[in-house]
Amino acid sequence: MGTHAAALGITVVAYRLARKHAANPRYTFGTGKIGVLGGFTSAVVLAVVALMIAAESVQRLVSPQPIRIRD
């Protein structure tokens, strides 16, 4: 949940930055790319976390940990 919130936060920051500088003439082709880059960055963050979870799952399948049962 924390990684999803962080990815959503990246997207919100990119959206606000794009809206703030929408009328700025320095951005010749507009600020649309800021939102696209924000979305891409959040997708990459989520993909990295998904790969880390998959690697941990494979590791636990290959060498399972014993479960300690309370008496």
Image (tube, grey):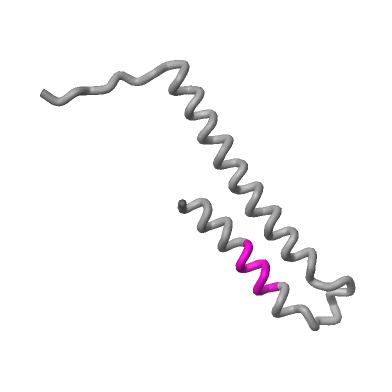
Q: Quadrant of residue 18?
A: bottom right
In the image, residue 67 above or below residue 15? above
Q: Quadrant of residue 34?
A: bottom right
Q: Which residue is at 51% across, 58% downward?
A: 5
- Where residue 29 sits: x, y (%)? 88, 71
- Where residue 42 sits: x, y (%)? 63, 54
In the image, residue 26 above or below residue 49? below
Q: Which residues are magenta?
A: 11-17
Q: Quadrant of residue 63?
A: top left
- Where residue 46 sits: x, y (%)? 59, 47
Q: Which residue is at 48% across, 22% downward?
A: 59
In the image, residue 23 above or below residue 2? below
Residue 45 on the magenta segment: no
Is 15 on the left-hand or right-hand side of 54? right
Q: Residue furthest left?
A: 71
Is 4 on the left-hand or right-hand side of 63? right
Q: Quadrant of the C terminus?
A: top left
Q: Residue furthest top?
A: 62
